[in-house]
Amino acid sequence: MEENKKPLHVGIIMDGNGRWAVSRGKKRSYGHNAGSANVDRIVTHAFQNGIKTLTLYAFSAENWARPQEEVDELMRLLKVYFKKFIKKIIKNKVRLFVMGDLTKLTDDLQKTIKECMDASAQYTEHVLNIAINYGGRQEIVYAVNRLIKKGQEITVDGISQELYTAQFGEPDLIIRTGGEMRISNFMLYQGAYSELYFTDVLWPDFSETELDKALESFVGRKRRFGKI
Ligand code: FPP
């Protein structure tokens, strides 16, 4: 069996911001700022290395339970990120998509996200998909409910087609930084056959070289999709 080609769709669970900051004697928010700065670096490198779709887990449906100050800082960083994104849409030709239940976000953030999504919808070469107030279980329930509302039978393919990511396909590779070896409700349905890559490197330290290591690991694997 041939080795893999490079992955086209990569998902990243960006973990470890808090520990990165605490180990420097700083507040967790400091780590989220550093993590946010790292997003652009990795997005650029990913798109330069043949990845077409990059899905980033920025805020889980469970993250609301964090201290309010931390939630506020993450929402502020996301807003800053999208405002900057708007300015660069034409130059970068990257399509932005945000998946999750966005109704819980402030009106202002929802509006900014919609502007980014609408203004970049015509680009097909690269997709940056950011998961906000996202949970994989919630997404499956959302997809099934959509099928029920349409009066359609619940099938494996039917659910796939109603997921947020239906148009972007399934991730070939899911990377988790920060040392934990779990999926934490990320892309549960579409990740059924994704290759997994775990690294102890904390997200703010996850450099271009670290991404290269993950991509090399993927290329060296044999995917069987349940077959022999
Ligand atoms: C996990 O680290 C990280 C998050 C919950 C948020 C990820 C957010 C960013 C990288 C910044 C904003 C994102 C974008 C797309 C601009 P943690 O806080 O769980 O770290 P810990 O495990 O060390 O506590």
Image: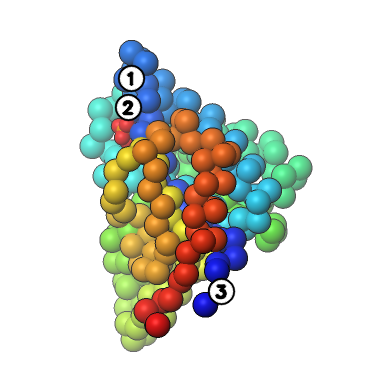
Categorize mark 2 by other alpha carbons within 10 Å: few (<14), some (14-19), many (20+). Answer: some
Q: Which residue is mark 1?
A: 23
Of 52 and 76, nearer the camera is 52
- Residue 100 in view of the camera: no
Q: Earlier in the sequence, mark 1 or mark 3?
A: 3
Is the residue at mark 2 in contact range of ligand 1, meaning its CB lies under 8 Å from it? yes
Residue 131 percent across, percent down from the top left: 43, 49
- Distance from Cα at disc 1 to Cα at disc 3: 43 Å
Proximity of marks 2 and 1: CB atoms separated by less than 8 Å = yes
Q: Residue at x 57, y 46 (%)?
A: 212
Q: Which residue is mark 2?
A: 19
Residue 29 percent across, percent down from the top left: 38, 23
Relative horizontal placement of residue 19, taking residue 215 as reference (left or right)? left
Q: Earlier in the sequence, mark 2 or mark 3?
A: 3
> Which quarter of the picture shows residue 227?
bottom left
Relative horizontal placement of residue 67, taking residue 40 as reference (left or right)? left
